[in-house]
Image: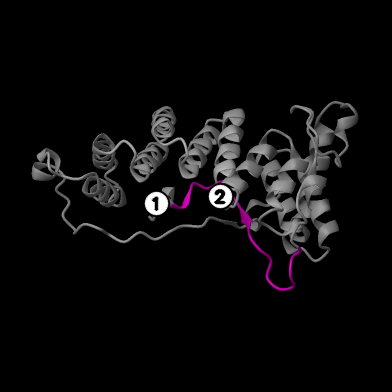
């Protein structure tokens, strides 16, 4: 699949600056015992925007010390750790956060995303399921769950989850994008073919299917004969566990209207965990 032709989008939320433009996070800001958790949190966000990640970590940590139930501070602290690729620290932060705030769908989604980054797909699925149990309309958690299912080869279930928030053809295009990212071009081809079955005018699938078909053919030529699952139309690769592809249990998928095609999505943190650069 030609990566440049698959447009990725992520919803972000703009946050206002709460403090002024002072960059001095020492002195009275860090020493006064009277500073509230909200002020610490606001200082952390300002420092994070200035790419002062050590300073942001310090302020978010102090905000949590002052208020262990402050979901926003836990979210930002874990997010900064993920930005620094300190995934173990991020995981520890989110585990602590959930112990203090077990009913936060946001924290469970973000913990799931951390697990997804660490390729702990079982843990990721558990957290996204928990987030959706707390908030069934949580679109970000639904999309992240769909991506996780595709990562472990449950392509039918993945498409069903994507279809809850996207038109059916674009749901299959997202499955194809995940497969292509894993260099699984046979299943990417299968997903694009399904997208065109749902909507013959799907531009994303139409623009990429010939290229993916060539890659799938090349991959099959370079590999030894496989089992019956080597058919390009299979929905589960041979390296992943077998599961029921229960896409028929999903609610009716939305059809694409005529006009510009919706864009393909990618894994995303919760709205509060998306830093505005």
Residue shown at the point (55%, 43%) measured from the top left? 134
Does the magenta stretch mainly form a helix, a strand or a loop?
loop
Question: Which stretch did the figure color magenta?
Answer: 255-271
Q: Position of residue 167 (x, y in %)?
A: 72, 60
Q: Position of residue 101 (x, y in %)?
A: 41, 36
Q: Is residue 164 visible?
A: yes
The residue wearing badge 1 is 275
Q: Residue 257 lies in magenta, yes or no?
A: yes
Residue shown at the point (51%, 57%) measured from the top left? 11
Number of residues whose C-alpha sits closer than 10 Å to that of mark 1, classed few (under 14), some (14–19) or many (20 or more): some
Q: Residue 235 lies in magenta, yes or no?
A: no
58 with respect to 198 (left or right): left
Q: Which mark is on residue 140? A: 2
Type of colouring: one colour
- Determine whether 28 is above or below 264 in the image: above
| Secondary-structure class at tag 2 | helix
| Secondary-structure class at tag 1 | loop
Q: Position of residue 204 (x, y in %)?
A: 72, 60
Q: Position of residue 264 (x, y in %)?
A: 64, 56
Quadrant of the rendered image containing residue 227:
top right
């Amino acid at each position: 699949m030609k990566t440049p032709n698959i447009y990725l989008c992520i919803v972000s939320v703009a946050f206002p600056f709460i403090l002024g433009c002072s960059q001095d996070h020492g002195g009275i800001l860090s020493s006064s015992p009277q500073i509230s958790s909200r002020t610490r949190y606001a200082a952390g966000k300002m420092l994070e925007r200035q790419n002062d990640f050590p300073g942001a970590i310090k302020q978010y940590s102090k905000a949590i010390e002052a208020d262990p139930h402050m979901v926003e501070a836990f979210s930002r602290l874990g997010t900064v750790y993920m930005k620094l690729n300190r995934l173990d620290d991020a995981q520890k932060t989110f585990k602590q956060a959930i112990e203090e705030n077990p009913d936060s769908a946001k924290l469970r989604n973000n913990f799931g995303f951390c697990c997804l980054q660490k390729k702990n797909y079982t843990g990721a699925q558990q957290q996204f399921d928990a987030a959706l149990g707390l908030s069934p309309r949580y679109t970000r958690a639904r999309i992240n769950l769909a991506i996780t299912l595709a990562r472990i080869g449950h392509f039918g279930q993945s498409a069903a989850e994507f279809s809850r928030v996207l038109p059916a053809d674009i749901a299959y295009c997202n499955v194809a994008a995940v497969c292509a990212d894993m260099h699984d071009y046979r299943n990417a081809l299968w997903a694009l073919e399904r997208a065109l079955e749902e909507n013959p005018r799907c531009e994303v699938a139409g623009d990429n299917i010939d290229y993916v078909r060539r890659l799938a053919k090349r991959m099959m030529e370079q590999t030894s004969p496989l089992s019956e699952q080597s058919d390009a139309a299979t929905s589960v690769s041979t390296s992943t566990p077998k599961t029921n592809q229960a896409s028929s249990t999903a609610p009716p998928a939305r059809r694409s209207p005529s006009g510009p095609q919706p864009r393909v999505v990618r894994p995303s943190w919760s709205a509060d965990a998306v830093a505005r650069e």
